[in-house]
Amino acid sequence: MKLPSAATGLFLGTAAATPLSLRSSTLNYNMAPPNLSTLPNNSLYETWRPRAHVLPPNGQIGDPCMHYTDPATGVFHVGWLHDSAGIAGATTSDLATYTDLNPNGGQAIVPGGINDPVGVFDGSVIPSGINGLPTLLYTSVSYLPIHWSIPYTRGSETQSLAVTTDSGRNFTKLDQGPVIPGPPFAANVTAFRDPYVFQNTQLDTLTSSQSNTWYTVISGGIHNQGPTQFLYRQYDPDFQYWEYLGQWWSEPTNSTWGDGTWAGRWGFNFETGNVFSLNEEGYTADGEIFGTLGTEGSDLPIVKQLTSIHDQLWVAGSVAKNTNGSVEFTPSMAGFLDWGFSSYAASGKVLPATSKPSTQSGAPDRYISYVWLTGDQYGQAEGFPTNQQNWTGALLLPRELKVQSLDVVDNALSREEGASWRVESNNTDAGTVELRTLGISIARETEAKLLSGKPSVEAGRTVSSAGVLPFQHSPESKFFVLKTNISFPASARQSGLQTGFQILASESEHTSIYYQFANESVVIDRSNTSAAAQTTSGIDSFTESGKLRLFDVLDGGEESVETLDLTIVVDNSILEVYANGRFALSTWVRSWYANSTEIRFLHNGVGQATFSNVTVSEGLYNAWPERA
Ligand SMILES: *[C@@H]1O[C@H](CO)[C@@H](O)[C@H](O)[C@H]1NC(C)=O
Ligand SMILES: *[C@@H]1O[C@H](CO)[C@@H](O)[C@H](O)[C@H]1NC(C)=O
Ligand SMILES: *[C@@H]1O[C@H](CO)[C@@H](O)[C@H](O)[C@H]1NC(C)=O
Ligand SMILES: *[C@@H]1O[C@H](CO)[C@@H](O)[C@H](O)[C@H]1NC(C)=O
Ligand SMILES: *[C@@H]1O[C@H](CO)[C@@H](O)[C@H](O)[C@H]1NC(C)=O
Ligand SMILES: *[C@@H]1O[C@H](CO)[C@@H](O)[C@H](O)[C@H]1NC(C)=O
Ligand SMILES: *[C@@H]1O[C@H](CO)[C@@H](O)[C@H](O)[C@H]1NC(C)=O
Ligand SMILES: *[C@@H]1O[C@H](CO)[C@@H](O)[C@H](O)[C@H]1NC(C)=O
Ligand SMILES: *[C@@H]1O[C@H](CO)[C@@H](O)[C@H](O)[C@H]1NC(C)=O
Ligand SMILES: *[C@@H]1O[C@H](CO)[C@@H](O)[C@H](O)[C@H]1NC(C)=O
Ligand SMILES: *[C@@H]1O[C@H](CO)[C@@H](O)[C@H](O)[C@H]1NC(C)=O
Ligand SMILES: *[C@@H]1O[C@H](CO)[C@@H](O)[C@H](O)[C@H]1NC(C)=O
């Protein structure tokens, strides 16, 4: 990229040579921004950098993967693809603060070996693998390009092993060929990658395997048939051979769960499939089977990567044997793990009660998932000031996944088929049903630490006229958590109400976050989020939204609309909105002006809503205390 040599007059000297601590002082956030792509390298490093999120010291973060609890230390390891050149990682003892495994966030495994001359893609770890050591099963790449929309080059993706003997700083490749050397016989695949290792008692029983056998799903698809997961099981104690058990889950090309309302599209190809089992507390080996997965697709018959869809979904279902004896997974519900356009490639891991974070917090066995937030629209945000920022993307806050149960009124709202919940049981006398869905919430240690910032309580209020109303106590910074409950009268369902907040607000900018019954959505309107979007291409400003149904519930015998329970995390440019323990929507909010820190109540349309327990915790912690 050619960068103009003439300075725009808004910075002093050459920022590229400016020490880190002075970088941000060279820009004037009280004046309109220039075209940010014309600034010197590194000049925007601090501008939008988050404080409490996982990201490398610099460069690009890709898919999270390679997480595990080290059996020797109980410390949890989080990994991610880094700069398209292997996998880097960090450790955490509290799911809040992290320590890089290598200096400058360097990789623990890089491409360039005989099995992986051109790439190392996602892998997952057997914590006590070969010789009892953490053992990585990863996709070793020999040919590029690989994309579901083009014919597949044979041998592009194989699965290989690497083992660590130094607590995860280096995963050393075994001096041998791949352990899964290619897709099943004559399968014309769209992809064959992201092996995810797991244990499952239901599969042990169904396939007459020894207990605690390791399985792996490999994500991909078959040309002209559809996306699929290939299932394998461990054959020997050294993980040298993996026995193929079939395409345990396949969907037709470009199909949907239900009519697509609640769970996007299955698309043309599956990626980053995880499989795990949950109960209402968290993880259990014999619980209900869940998965998270990325789906790739396109709205257009003529496929261009630019118009690719990347949906970050979850699915639950049952396993059974076919008449021919092979194992089959059948979905019973599906939804979005995160509704954001940039949210994708989630990867999680079992976090045992005996791990360091859990012994400190008293948590039971859990399943913890990290979602990727691409920083440049999957590399397609043309003109994004990548060199000026010198980091791209982040991982979203760790999430605890579990089964969520809800007692709600038995009516058309709860009985909808093809949704992201299912009816577990009914109580005819009470006129209620028990629903099951996936519970999604910020990991408890992470949330507790986020809430340990400077607290302020905003008086609750009932609003009935349209408009905005500034908080008495707005934050002074762009680092805070906002929590509230909003309740609505039954009449709100038929109204055009939009109720929520404006955040990161000043005269010049604001981001609106509201719930609207019209399409049962949480909406993030970013059309006025950033003055920089007007001067710089690649700063996205489109509206994000996700569907959340507020059910009817019985409150002391009376029917009422379920309360909207909101947690909004603002970590400078990263916005995560969580609702009702089962909804997440994350996106970028790149405000420019220093004083865009106001919060305002927002209410549009006819009807009323009541905000209660409005609290702001300001500050957020530094997730990387050991970085300079
Ligand atoms: C916010 O900053 C802008 C730009 O410097 C300035 O014009 C405006 O007066 C400031 N607003 C407040 C409330 O201080
Ligand atoms: C800015 O960074 C890019 C990418 O690393 C590099 O190609 C370019 O030479 C740098 N420009 C300057 C002026 O250092
Ligand atoms: C890991 O160790 C092996 C064996 O010493 C070495 O060849 C390799 O370069 C190391 N990998 C990284 C990423 O440092
Ligand atoms: C595999 O699928 C691709 C894309 O549809 C097609 O071009 C190719 O002919 C197929 N190969 C075989 C062996 O069927
Ligand atoms: C996928 O399905 C959608 C909805 O039916 C349709 O609009 C789109 O054209 C399809 N895409 C392709 C590539 O067939
Ligand atoms: C078993 O049956 C399923 C469903 O009918 C089919 O998809 C699969 O290919 C069959 N497997 C074998 C090994 O024949
Ligand atoms: C990003 O930061 C690293 C470390 O400070 C530096 O080596 C690299 O040149 C920077 N890249 C750009 C594009 O400024
Ligand atoms: C309600 O539950 C009973 C069992 O408790 C079941 O027989 C019946 O089919 C259920 N009815 C509906 C409408 O789900
Ligand atoms: C919101 O309400 C739920 C129960 O309906 C409660 O568990 C939660 O603590 C409330 N949140 C706030 C911020 O008061
Ligand atoms: C910003 O500058 C870049 C680099 O000179 C240029 O390609 C781009 O078109 C400019 N964007 C706008 C919105 O002017
Ligand atoms: C809901 O409606 C808004 C417009 O008010 C739209 O921007 C958004 O995409 C819709 N969301 C869903 C999930 O349908
Ligand atoms: C507000 O918080 C208090 C104490 O934290 C709790 O008892 C009460 O139920 C909450 N009210 C609502 C409406 O969430």
Image (cartoon, rainbow, N blue to C red):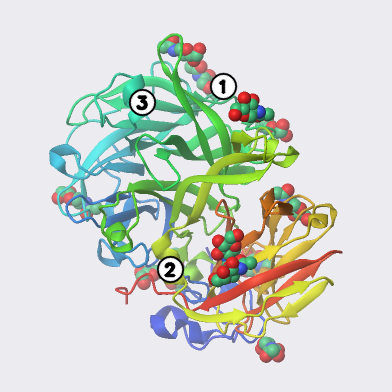
Identified by mark 3, the residue type is Leu
Instruction: Identify the residue at image location x=43%, y=68%.
Output: 448
Residue beneath label 2, please?
Answer: 448
Q: Position of residue 269 (x, y in %)?
A: 53, 33
Q: Residues within 10 Å of mark 1 (few under 14, many from 20)?
A: some
Instruction: Identify the residue at image location x=69%, y=81%.
Output: 506
Label of residue 373 in the image: none
* Distance from the alpha carbon under mark 2 to that under mark 3: 36 Å
Between 481 and 491, the one lying in front of the other is 491
Q: Image quadrant for the C terminus?
A: bottom left
Identified by mark 2, the residue type is Ala
Between 394 and 466, the one lying in front of the other is 466
Label of residue 225 in the image: 1
Q: Residues within 10 Å of mark 3 (few under 14, many from 20)?
A: many
Q: Residues within 10 Å of mark 2 (few under 14, many from 20)?
A: few
Residue beneath label 3, please?
Answer: 203
The furthest residue to the right: 606
Q: Earlier in the sequence, mark 1 or mark 3?
A: 3
